[in-house]
Amino acid sequence: MILTIISFALIFTAIVVIHELGHLLFARLFKVRILAFGIGFGPAIYRKKTASGMDFKINLFPLGGYVRMDGEDPTEIDESVSEEKRRGFYYSKTAWQRFLIALAGPAFSILAGYLLLSVVALFWGIPQVGIAKVDPYSPAQEAGLRDDDVISKLNGKILFDTDELSTTIKNSDSVDLTVTRGDEQEKITVYPEVFPRQYEMIIKGESIPDNLTLSQIKSVNGLSLEEVDLSEYSGEEIVMVTESGEEIKGVLSGYQLIKERKVIGIEFKTLSRTLKSTQAPFKNGDEILSINDKKIQKGNDLFTILRFMDFPVDSQIPYHYLSIRDSTVLDVETMKNLNTVTVQVLRNGVNVSLEMPSEVFIQSLGNSFFEPPVENKQTMNPFLAISWGFQWSNNLLRRMGMIIGNIFTGEQDISEFSGPVGIVNIIGQATKAGFESLVLIFALITLNLGIINLIPLPALDGGRIVFNLIEMVSRKKINPVIEGYIHAAGFFFIMALAVYITYFDIMRFMK
């Protein structure tokens, strides 16, 4: 926990200082008098007055930083000051100069993100999207996609993550994929189709009929799947009847309804079987082979096991997982004796059997990090790696902009954002995962800071940019006192928003 707090403090401070350095350098460029530049907050542990009169301080608590420009707050300006001194005031500068000073902070943040992602691409490569499973009779199978294919490009551009592919499929009639299969590449066009809604259920019951896969569900408690509201039966006994008359009885312990959607019928690789960083009784480098006699062929098979772990253990009555699309049973898995978990791992070339209570198993895996399910794509050409880093940054910036736009249109809930508590948790996880993850998180947060500060809200750089643009277009100077009060109101609004987001951060952390 101490390492997490130290990592958060240092990274957060570095991110803010880079941002404030942009404001500082452009303010100096336009001869704005700088009163102070501080790293951290609280009592100064190092202090120096520069030749220009700036008070440079390194403070006790490394939680951000700040730059203070003379005349930045028009409500505090003394009217009796001389004209010569006024020339160094922030508000004495022209609108286009103030525009560039305000823009410099977000620009430096975004530029730092580009540089950091280029470093990641150069030393560790870029992530790739792998296919764990291709659904039978799906558009993906018809187009020629196979299990273990790696999708390297989407519509001619590098594909960096699964979200981008899912979003594109959702909004397209066709997608052009460049697939890496062994040492060969192949271009494949896939035509997405609208799949009917899908039900995923956990049923607690003595037994269920054999060979249910591809069976048709005729009814649930006397109603068809389209008519029944499963939320009314959560925690209660249900009876499902197949077209052949077989019954599936048990308590509906959990369920998820996946609505009708456009897909191509693939399952992404999201986990590997190999533990990168873990805790006892596992060891770093362990490869999970089976759990309670269930073979783990691929990392995604772990999800089947983990689905059962959210429910109370019972050594007598088994749990059954059913995946049903429309009315067809796609997958069935059964798990018994959840009190004790037996895990077979491959450790240094030797098969090792580990037996542990389910609580220890959940805690150990919950504090573990897995090797990437697909190896990063790497190159020895530094210019190509930097190009990848810039493309990666462009991709992330575009999607961040879309997310912020969705907040204003109501398509995205602001409670899904992370505040200080959430960021501490994210950095803590990255610290455990390794230096690569830490640099990547650094890049993502500084990109986020840059794009969020461009939102045209008072008190943010984006709000100041808008005021300067208005002045540049209208050629009329806005009363700086009125603008100052507007920014002050915006500051209190943003603080209230931060408290709101932090509340949800804490709720997620407690869960």
Image: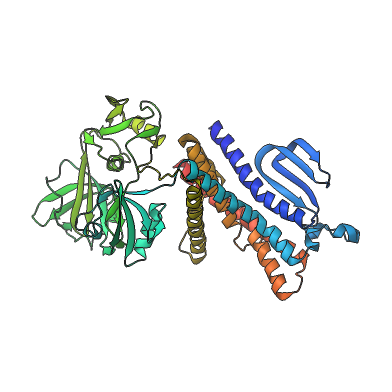
Q: Between 357 and 234, which is closer to the camera in this rendering?
A: 357
Q: Is residue 205 left or right of residue 468?
A: left
Tell me where residue 98 appears, x and y as whole percent: 73, 62
Q: What residue is rendered at 72% in x and 65% in y?
A: 96
Q: Is residue 424 left or right of residue 319?
A: right
Q: In this view, does 160 lie to the left or right of 238?
A: right
Q: Between 397 and 44, which is closer to the camera in this rendering?
A: 397
Answer yes or no: is residue 77 visible: yes
Snapshot colouring: rainbow
Check the image and report above or below for 372 versus 226.
Answer: above
Q: Between 426 and 359, which is closer to the camera in this rendering?
A: 426
Q: Quadrant of the C terminus?
A: top left
Q: What residue is rendered at 66% in x and 66% in y?
A: 466
Tell me where residue 186 appears, x and y as whole percent: 29, 55
Answer yes or no: is residue 221 visible: no
Q: How many discs appear?
A: 0
Check the image and report above or below for 51 versus 98.
Answer: above
Check the image and report above or below for 71 versus 293.
Answer: below
Which residue extends farthest left? 244
Check the image and report above or below for 5 versus 500.
Answer: above
Q: What residue is rendered at 30% in x and 46% in y?
A: 183
Tell me where residue 434 appears, x and y as whole percent: 48, 35
Which residue extends farthest bottom? 474
Tell me where residue 429 appears, x and y as whole percent: 48, 38
